[in-house]
Image (cartoon, grey):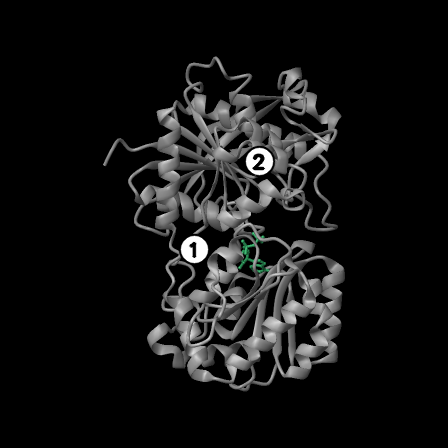
């Protein structure tokens, strides 16, 4: 093997320390997969107060208040703690940048009560981005690559191209910026820009400004050496459509040659029905007979009657506009008439929660709902459902459809982003891994579910589709190799 690379991976959420969605799963699994390929990769994230010192055996790397970071006119002091993630053979070191003013809170981006974004999210992530670079200098560990993820890390490439461009230690570093979701941009009022300390001429259209705001995502997209996103289809969508590009498709299309689609993988150490301790009964493609026991446990958990011949649709999701639950609501009565059962684990938008709560009251024998975040229940839903529905408006990659396939739970998805890249539509005679529909239209979702319902009545055909999905390999190794190749390309330049 050629010389191992040094990579710093930056993320605002990393499983098991802090998670609101798929970013945390990726930020945990991808670094481990890159490490397995023989490279030195370390993670840095904020130290939120709820990350337990005891549970994760945090230890001091850089003592209290030793890292001065300018935020506006103030100097904020940081310190660094460390822990490891080690689902695989190799341990990956995680650094936590700590500052009690900014991160000594109960939420990641918003207060758990009231669900309002913290007002100083600009300052919090200015501190993080600059603090990361100051920390590297203090550690004396020089990465070849800094791999940034989403808007919270977007200022790092901008700092490297400005305040630190003559710093002999930081200057050689190349940056990769990965987009996990274009809809979250970290766009702050113009008067927040001076707090960053970036040169004045960076606040322009060819820079960090977008639509009159200081846009952290744009900073990452504009100043990084390469951009990736989490599926080929999403890369195409965001660089060609204003809607998918959320106002930044022009910039992405100009940077098309630097924009790469690399599909997320899934962590089979966590999501594998053959070894999953969180489900009722383990199984694999050769022991599918054990799967209905999970369905029995799942329906029991929601106090629904169990009937092996009743198809259960599962859903696990943040309840936000992106995820398309308005389409499900539109056709819900129809689905009930067809005899489906439906279980939802969701967290988010209160009006969507209310709508499903009243459907549960209306159809107590067919509908189960749980609102909140529950890892264990997520695993049981994957194992116990027959179908898994993801009618997203857009979906950069999506993980649950891949988990579902591994659990023999057939996904019903809208053909967008990573959903389109990972699910093959059922084409009869045992072909395909799921059911897809193209337009964002409730009638089309209904057609896909009617088709699924019909196939469910043909157990042999159904099992073939289940097995096709279970046989798919979405492991991280393949994606990790693609990232490493990209890092190497950048270092040649
Ligand atoms: P996104 O990142 O847009 O939320 P993904 O499909 O990429 O969507 O990833 C979602 C991840 O979050 C999956 O691991 C899923 O199981 C998990 N998840 C989402 N909502 C919940 C919830 N309410 N409880 C437990 N896990 C959840």
- Badge 2 marks a residue whose secondary structure is helix
Q: Which residue is drawn at 55% across and 52% down?
A: 417
Q: How far apart are marks 1 and 2 (CA)?
A: 29 Å
- Residue 167 coordinates in the image, percent (x, y): 46, 14
Callout 1 crowding tier (Cα within 10 Å): few <14, some 14–19, many ≥20: many
Q: Residue 190 carries which label?
A: none
- Residue 406 coordinates in the image, percent (x, y): 42, 65
Classify 139 as above or below 307. above
Q: Is residue 231 visible?
A: no
Q: Which of 335 and 342 is in front in this view?
A: 335
- Badge 1 marks a residue whose secondary structure is loop
Q: Nearer the viewer, mark 1 or mark 2?
A: 2
Q: Say whether residue 407 is left or right of residue 481.
A: right
Question: According to the image, label 1 marks what residue?
Answer: 266
Q: Which residue is drawn at 30% across and 43% down?
A: 37
Q: Quadrant of residue 77?
A: top right
Q: Residue at x 35, y 49 (%)?
A: 477
Classify 2 as above or below 406. above
Q: Earlier in the sequence, mark 1 or mark 2?
A: 2
Q: Say whether residue 223 is left or right of residue 71.
A: left
- Residue 70 coordinates in the image, percent (x, y): 61, 20
Q: Residue 253 carries which label?
A: 2
Callout 2 crowding tier (Cα within 10 Å): few <14, some 14–19, many ≥20: some
């Amino acid at each position: 093997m050629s010389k191992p690379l040094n990579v710093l991976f930056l993320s605002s959420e990393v499983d098991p320390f802090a998670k609101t969605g798929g970013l945390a799963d990726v930020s945990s699994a991808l670094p481990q997969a890159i490490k397995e390929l023989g490279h030195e990769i370390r993670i840095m994230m904020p130290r939120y107060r709820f990350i337990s010192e005891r549970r994760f055996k945090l230890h001091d790397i850089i003592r209290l208040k030793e890292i001065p970071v300018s935020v506006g006119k103030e100097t904020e002091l940081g310190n660094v703690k460390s822990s490891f993630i080690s689902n695989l053979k190799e341990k990956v070191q995680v650094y936590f940048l700590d500052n009690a003013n900014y991160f000594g809170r109960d939420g990641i981006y918003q207060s758990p009560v009231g669900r309002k974004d913290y007002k100083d999210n600009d300052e919090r992530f200015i501190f993080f981005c600059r603090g990361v670079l100051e920390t590297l200098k203090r550690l004396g560990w020089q990465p070849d690559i800094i791999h940034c993820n989403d808007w919270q890390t977007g200022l790092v490439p901008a700092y490297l191209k400005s305040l630190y461009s003559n710093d002999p230690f930081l200057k050689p570093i190349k940056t990769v910026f990965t987009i996990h979701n274009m809809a979250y941009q970290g766009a702050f009022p113009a008067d927040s820009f001076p707090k960053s300390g970036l040169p004045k001429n960076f606040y322009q259209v060819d820079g960090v400004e977008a639509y009159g705001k200081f846009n952290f995502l744009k900073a990452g997209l504009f100043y990084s050496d390469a951009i990736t996103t989490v599926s080929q289809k999403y890369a195409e969508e965001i660089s060609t459509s204003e809607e998918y590009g959320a106002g930044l498709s022009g910039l992405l299309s100009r940077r098309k040659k630097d924009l790469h689609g690399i599909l997320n993988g899934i962590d089979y150490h966590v999501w594998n029905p053959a070894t999953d301790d969180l489900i009722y009964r383990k199984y694999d493609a050769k022991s599918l007979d054990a799967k209905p026991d999970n369905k029995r446990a799942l329906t029991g958990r929601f106090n629904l009657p169990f009937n092996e011949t009743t198809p259960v649709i599962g859903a696990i999701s943040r309840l936000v506009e992106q995820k398309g639950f308005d389409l499900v609501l539109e056709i819900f009565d129809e689905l009930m008439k067809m005899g489906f059962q439906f279980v939802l684990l969701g967290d988010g938008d209160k009006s969507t929660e209310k709508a499903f709560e009243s459907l549960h009251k209306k159809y107590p024998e067919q509908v189960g709902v749980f609102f909140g975040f529950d890892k264990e229940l997520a695993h049981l839903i994957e194992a116990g459902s027959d179908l898994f529905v993801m009618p997203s408006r857009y979906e950069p990659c999506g993980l649950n459809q891949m988990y579902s396939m591994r659990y023999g739970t057939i996904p019903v998805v809208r053909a967008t982003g990573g959903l389109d890249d990972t699910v093959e539509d059922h084409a009869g005679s045992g072909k395909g891994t799921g059911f897809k529909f193209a337009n964002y239209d409730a009638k089309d979702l209904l057609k896909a579910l009617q088709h699924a319902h019909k196939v469910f009545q043909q157990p042999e055909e159904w099992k073939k589709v289940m097995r096709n999905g279970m046989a798919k390999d979405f492991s991280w190794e393949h994606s990790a190799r693609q990232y490493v190749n990209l890092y190497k390309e950048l270092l040649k330049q």
